[in-house]
């Protein structure tokens, strides 16, 4: 009997260690988009640190499944949530978001495009507002190339972006938020 319990505990520990090892591997989210004559958006996710090929989450080129229309139900009235710690929780949300955003690594952001409003003055004004983004980002990971078209109204372009997230690195900000929002009050 004791041997069976030891084997079961060992298997449980091995499973827990395997889950922790998988959570320590980075996950890569990539997006490619195109707008112009044919608009397209494709979202992919690369699991296990790139050990397996990326899986397509969404591709606008593939036709979607037809949805059945269900009759609408009357929405129920909900009471506002007013728990004891709701103000404390709301105060900790910015720190949670800051902590989560620090764990997201921008691998690549490429934007190439052409735009025009139809009015040369408006096109110039928009380009003037966007210019600090174009020339104020001295990094190799971010590349933005926008060209104004003063002759016609148009919007053409391509976007490629990729983010890397390590799931286990999201745990400390989430635990910190949970402790501060729901933990003991001083």
Image (spheres, helix red, strand yellow):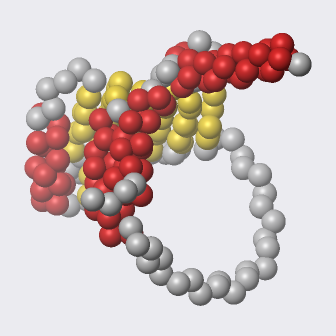
Task: Name the one closer to the observer, 13 or 70.
Answer: 13
Residue found 60% across the figure and 18% down from its top:
17
Task: Name the one closer to the observer, 104 or 70.
Answer: 104
Residue 30 appearing in the image? no
- Is 87 left or right of 130, judged from the image as shown? right
Give the mark count.
0
Q: Position of residue 92 (x, y in %)?
A: 31, 56
Q: Position of residue 3 (x, y in %)?
A: 83, 13
Quadrant containing the C terminus is: bottom left
Residue found 39% across the figure and 54% down from its top:
183
- Is 81 left or right of 136, judged from the image as shown? right
Residue found 79% across the figure and 15% down from its top:
7
Residue found 35% across the figure and 32% down from its top:
103
Q: Position of residue 62 (x, y in %)?
A: 69, 41
Residue 181, above or below 169: below
Task: Name the one closer to the observer, 19 or 134.
Answer: 19
Task: Name the one closer to the observer, 17 or 184.
Answer: 184
């Amino acid at each position: 009997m004791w041997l069976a319990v030891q084997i079961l505990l060992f298997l449980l520990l091995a499973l827990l260690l395997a889950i922790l090892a998988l959570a320590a591997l980075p996950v890569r989210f990539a997006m490619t988009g195109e707008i112009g004559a044919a608009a397209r958006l494709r979202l992919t996710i690369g699991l296990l640190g790139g050990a397996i090929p990326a899986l397509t989450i969404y591709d606008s080129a593939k036709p979607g499944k037809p949805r059945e229309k269900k009759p609408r139900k009357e929405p129920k009235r909900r009471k506002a949530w007013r728990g004891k710690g709701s103000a404390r929780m709301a105060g900790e949300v910015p720190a949670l978001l800051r902590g989560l955003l620090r764990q997201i690594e921008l691998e690549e952001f490429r934007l190439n495009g052409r735009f025009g409003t139809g009015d040369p003055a408006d096109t110039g004004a928009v380009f003037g507002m966007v210019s600090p983004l174009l020339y104020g980002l001295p990094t190799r990971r971010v590349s933005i190339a926008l060209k104004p078209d003063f002759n016609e109204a148009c919007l053409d372009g391509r976007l490629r972006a990729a983010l890397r997230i390590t799931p286990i690195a999201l745990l400390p900000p989430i635990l910190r938020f949970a402790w501060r929002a729901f933990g003991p009050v001083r």
